[in-house]
Amino acid sequence: MSRLRIFANDDPGQALLDTRDQTEMARQLSAIGVRFEQWQANQPVQPGDPPERVLAAYRDDIAALMAEGGYQSVDVISLQPEHPEREALRAKFLDEHRHSEDEVRFFVAGSGVFTLHVDGRVFEVLCEAGDLISVPDGTRHWFDMGPRPFFVAIRLFTSTEGWVARFTGDDIASRFPRYDNEAVSA
């Protein structure tokens, strides 16, 4: 089940808020400009399905979001726990960074943690199947897929370049807990 924890940026040991209530999560995240909502598939989707089937299951939601946000491209990313480059892929996203466009992800299956650094607070968002998160451009954040990455996600982009990060050089991400999904199985 999805979860939001909010911390002071200098105290990773004590959550100021810890909730799994979807409405409260959306409210708290909306206050910092982050969109968080749940989607339902129009047809069943399984991990391992080809990207075309995954996109077809969410066609209407994707079309509405693309029109609303001016997104130009969409793709599907899928990672399994046995991926040979899982450690390198995980490390790529663990340092705090920003983007010049919104980072939009919809989790079809599995899970991952987006951690946002906004106004002296750290917002740790555990995203699971059915969750859509849209992190506004310029927002300092990092992403942790855990040591055993398992997720299928739809990504939307305004730029045809896809994912481009500008790293902040701040070591804040190293001071906060990592996502431990060791018990997650495909």
Image (cartoon, rainbow, N blue to C red):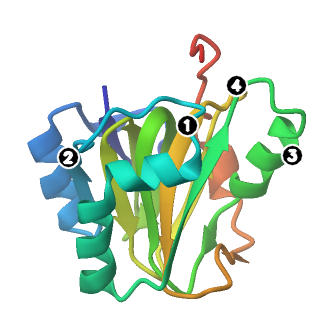
Comes first in the chain, label 4 or label 1: 1
Q: How far apart are marks 2 and 1 (CA)?
A: 30 Å
Q: Nearer the viewer, residue 72 or 107?
A: 72
Kindly identify which residue carries mark 1.
49
Residues at circles 2 and 4 in contact by the CB criterion of under 8 Å: no
Residue 126, how many percent across, how many down?
Answer: 41, 38
Q: How many numbered marks, from 0 up?
A: 4
Residue 13 visible, this angle? yes
Comes first in the chain, label 4 or label 3: 3
Q: Distance between the residues labelled 2 and 4?
A: 25 Å
Kindly identify which residue carries mark 3.
88
Closer to the eye: label 4 or 1? 1
Q: How far apart are marks 1 and 3 (CA)?
A: 24 Å
Kindly identify which residue carries mark 2.
25
- As helix, strand or loop, the secondary structure at mark 3 comes to helix
- As helix, strand or loop, the secondary structure at mark 2 comes to helix
Position of 185 compared to 56: left or right? right
Type of the residue with mark 2 = Met
Q: In which quarter of the image is residue 148?
A: top right
Q: Which residue does the image show at 66% across and 32% down from the upper left?
A: 149
Kindly identify which residue carries mark 4.
148
Position of 15 compared to 181: left or right? left
Residues at circles 1 and 3 in contact by the CB criterion of under 8 Å: no
Q: Which mark is residue 182?
A: none
Type of the residue with mark 4 = Arg
Closer to the eye: label 3 or 2? 3
Q: How crowded is mark 4: few (under 14 residues within 10 Å), some or many (20 or more)?
A: many
Type of the residue with mark 3 = Ala
Task: Tell me if residue 158 comes above or below residue 155 in the rendering.
Answer: below
Position of 90 compared to 1: left or right? right
